[in-house]
Amino acid sequence: MNTKSPFQRIESTTNLFATVLLYALYIVLGISFIFLFVLGPVYGIYKRGFEAMLSTTLICWGLSLLILIPTTRYYIIKRKKLAHKIVVDETGIVYYNSKNEITDQILYSELRPSKQNFDIYTVNPVGSGIVPMTEVTLQQEKNEETVKRIDMNLPLTIIKNKFTLYAQFLYGITLFRPDLKIDPTTFRVYSIDTATWKVNNKGVSQGGWLVILAALIITALIIGFVFLLSETKN
């Protein structure tokens, strides 16, 4: 392993404006959801009676539980396991929670050759957004080799330097694991100039804006539905 070459530590940075906008949209979405699916049936029971609203109430509260239980479990109960920061250094990729504790890591020493034409390549799985993920083969401790997809995203946060993190990770592979082959397409996907290891494009990725746009559309639909429902009752 080559440890002589200088290697800069890169930490994820947050796009504050985009993240605040995303939080605001989720708050509006959450409030609208509670009014429509939780408090709405209660108001219906008050106005129309329990028997008339029984089926509607069961459906709304059932849907609410299907959404609220996993959301509460993921974002509140298991919040200590949520990554809050991503760091790429001479060891690999390290994920930290809000208390600066390591929640996950992908070390250069754990990387293994793949069964594909290249050892490091990109994939674009369904539902991952328009930014592809890097796929690698790992062998952590005494476990069997596994294929892992690296997604430089954080929960409810828009990462400003996502492509820079990918670039630094790939640069680290060329330094510390020159035995592994990287698909040249990967560099074009992330707009990486391998002469300088700089990213050509700047700003929030299209995937980040896509998440914000989707949240905005869903929020508008729910608010519009609530408005139409109130007008119909009137």
Image (spheres, rainbow, N blue to C red):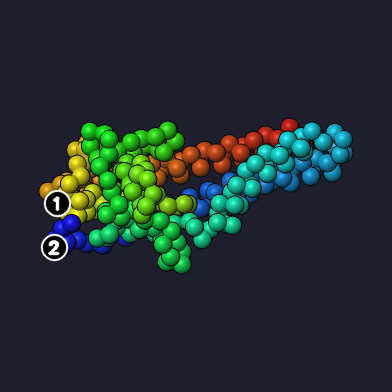
Q: Is residue 23 left or right of residue 88?
A: right
Across and down, in percent, residue 41 comes to 77, 41
Please give the name of the residue rendered at 59% of the width and 57% of the height, measured from the top-left corner: 77
**Callout 2: helix, strand or loop?**
loop
Identified by mark 2, the residue type is Lys
Identified by mark 1, the residue type is Thr
Please give the name of the residue rendered at 40% of the width and 43% of the height, measured from the top-left corner: 209
**Tags 1 and 2 touching, CB below 8 Å:** no
Near-viewer residue (53 or 21): 53
Q: Is residue 72 left or right of residue 217?
A: right
Instruction: Decide if residue 177 is in sight here.
Output: yes
* Residue under numbered circle 1: 196
Please give the name of the residue rendered at 35% of the width and 58% of the height, measured from the top-left corner: 94
Q: Is residue 188 left or right of residue 212?
A: left
Across and down, in percent, residue 53 comes to 82, 36
* Residue under numbered circle 2: 4
**Of marks 1 and 2, which one's residue comes earlier in the chain?**
2
Q: In which image quadrant can residue 61 be found?
A: top right
Across and down, in percent, residue 11 comes to 32, 60
Q: In which image quadrant can residue 75 be found?
A: bottom right
